């Protein structure tokens, strides 16, 4: 059977495995005719990423406007909004608690000998510290200030999703209240816009195996595997915590709150998970998340177009968990015991900042800087985790996206949608 006949998610998975092998073999230098493979992977990966990012603004605007204006009465919107926020806060908190427990049990930062010698500070630490500057809790306030943008076009152009979401929510709410003759054309327009975005997503998805291959091969060629050494235990702790949330906590919620078979949901989300993993960006993955949740999991557009764009921006379980483990790890590496009160502060700040963190690669580093300065730890500590951040970013992004999709399923079921994740002949990647 030709490779192209395989289902898309298999093609993507094969690309992923090949990418790791190729990345390890070629490294940063190898090339052909003066062009390094690394530069080639970087170029192709960037093209794929650009194509996904291109859709974010029109997709968020059209899906939220269509979703909210289709909800009808304000009590309906209030109910759905309440459930969505409640679910997001609950799962992020659960994720943080998983991270907190494992970081305290495993204590990845506690080492024999001088910690700074054992870990060795990354050369980039100083540059990073300069970039992050004197971040403090004021930055968290800043994020929430931007929720209400002074200029919505600027918010869109700058990728300030919270502001764009807020404006689109209001727009959809009042569009539903326009008289039929005035509202009809606009509603049709936004429905059409949304449909076109989904068609373009289909098209981009055909290139996903190539894009995923290039992105992952570039990352592996760049970081290799040596970086891990002393950080192995930290890496393991984060991985274990993410896996617990992904393989235990979320499926239990799917089963008990949603009444669905979690295995079906994993199958439905395959393409979105691999894309999240390779792009390390929940925002860039949003088009594919929407497609998988609607087409494969069978959630109505009404629910998913409200729950998912919000989730891609404010619900980051993997990120919240990572922030917590990273801060505890850094504290341990500096030989500091965090009191229960300080750990509580870390948990609260991880929850808050994970809401404000953008769905882009490495965004949590800034949040970690905020928490470190709030609890009085040196910012330089971030230098410790830089070497393994990218790979962990890929994993936590997949968890972020999966939690959003579980939210869509659970909320859809609670709204009486009976077709969600029902056995059907095709429950795999989007058929493109
Ligand atoms: N890369 C993550 C995301 O897009 C955010 C982060 O944790 O850095 O979901």
Image (cartoon, rainbow, N blue to C red):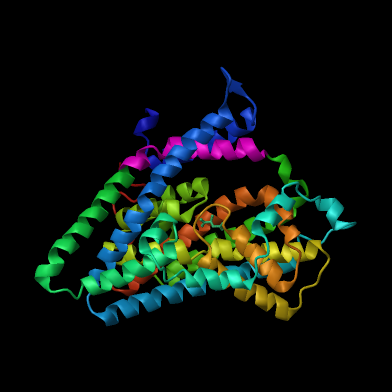
Residue 213 belongs to magenta span: yes
Say left or right for 151 vs 356: left
Say left or right for 89 vs 171: right
- Report if residue 162 is visible in the image: yes
Q: x, y (%) of residue 56?
A: 38, 53
**Majority SS type along the magenta span:** helix
- Tell me the quadrant of the picture where the C terminus can be found: top left
Residue 220 belongs to magenta span: yes
Above or below: residue 96 compared with residue 50 = below
Report the number of numbered marks. Answer: 0
Q: x, y (%) of residue 121?
A: 79, 51
The magenta span reads 203-224
Q: x, y (%) of residue 188?
A: 17, 60
Dividing the picture into quarters, in which one does residue 76 lie?
Answer: bottom left
Above or below: residue 347 compared with residue 357 = below
Q: Residue at x 34, y 68 (%)?
A: 167
- Tell me the quadrant of the picture where the N terminus can be found: top left
Q: Nearer the viewer, residue 58 or 31?
A: 58
């Amino acid at each position: 059977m030709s490779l192209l006949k395989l289902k898309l998610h298999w093609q993507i998975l094969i690309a992923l495995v090949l990418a790791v092998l190729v990345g390890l073999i070629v490294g940063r230098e190898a090339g052909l005719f003066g062009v390094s493979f690394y530069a080639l992977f970087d170029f192709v990966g960037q093209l794929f990423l650009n194509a996904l990012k291109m859709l974010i603004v029109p997709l968020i605007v059209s899906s939220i406007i269509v979703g909210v204006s289709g909800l009808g009465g304000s009590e309906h919107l209030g109910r759905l909004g309440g459930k969505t926020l409640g679910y997001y806060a609950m799962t992020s908190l659960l994720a943080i608690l998983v991270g907190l427990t494992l970081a305290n049990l495993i204590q990845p930062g506690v080492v024999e000998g001088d910690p700074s010698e054992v870990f060795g500070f990354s050369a980039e630490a100083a540059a990073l510290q300069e970039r992050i500057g004197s971040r403090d809790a004021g930055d968290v306030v800043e994020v929430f200030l931007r929720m209400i943008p002074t200029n919505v076009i600027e918010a869109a152009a700058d990728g300030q999703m919270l502001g764009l979401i807020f404006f689109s929510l209001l727009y959809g709410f009042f569009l539903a209240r326009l008289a039929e003759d005035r509202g009809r054309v606009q509603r049709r327009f936004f429905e059409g816009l949304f449909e076109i975005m989904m068609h373009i997503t289909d098209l981009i998805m055909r290139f996903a195996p190539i894009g995923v291959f290039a992105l992952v091969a570039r990352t592996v060629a760049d970081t290799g595997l040596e970086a891990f050494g002393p950080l192995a235990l930290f890496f393991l702790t984060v991985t274990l915590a993410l896996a617990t949330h992904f393989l235990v906590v979320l499926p239990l919620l799917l089963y008990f709150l949603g009444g669905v078979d979690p295995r079906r949901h994993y199958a439905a989300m395959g393409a979105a998970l691999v894309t999240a993993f390779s792009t390390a960006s929940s925002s860039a993955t949003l088009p594919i998340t929407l497609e998988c949740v609607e087409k494969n999991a069978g959630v109505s557009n009404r629910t998913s177009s409200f729950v998912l764009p919000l989730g891609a921006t404010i619900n980051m379980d993997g990120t919240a968990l990572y922030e917590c483990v990273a801060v505890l790890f850094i504290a341990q590496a500096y030989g500091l015991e965090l009191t229960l009160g300080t750990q509580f502060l870390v948990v609260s700040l991880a929850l808050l900042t994970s809401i404000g963190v953008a769905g882009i690669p490495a965004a949590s580093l800034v949040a970690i800087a905020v928490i470190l300065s709030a609890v009085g730890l040196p910012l330089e500590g971030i230098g410790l985790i830089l070497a393994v951040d990218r790979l962990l970013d890929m994993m936590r992004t997949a968890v972020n996206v999966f939690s959003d999709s579980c939210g869509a399923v659970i909320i859809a079921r609670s709204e009486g949608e009976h077709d969600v994740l029902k056995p059907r002949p095709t429950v795999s990647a989007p058929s493109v």
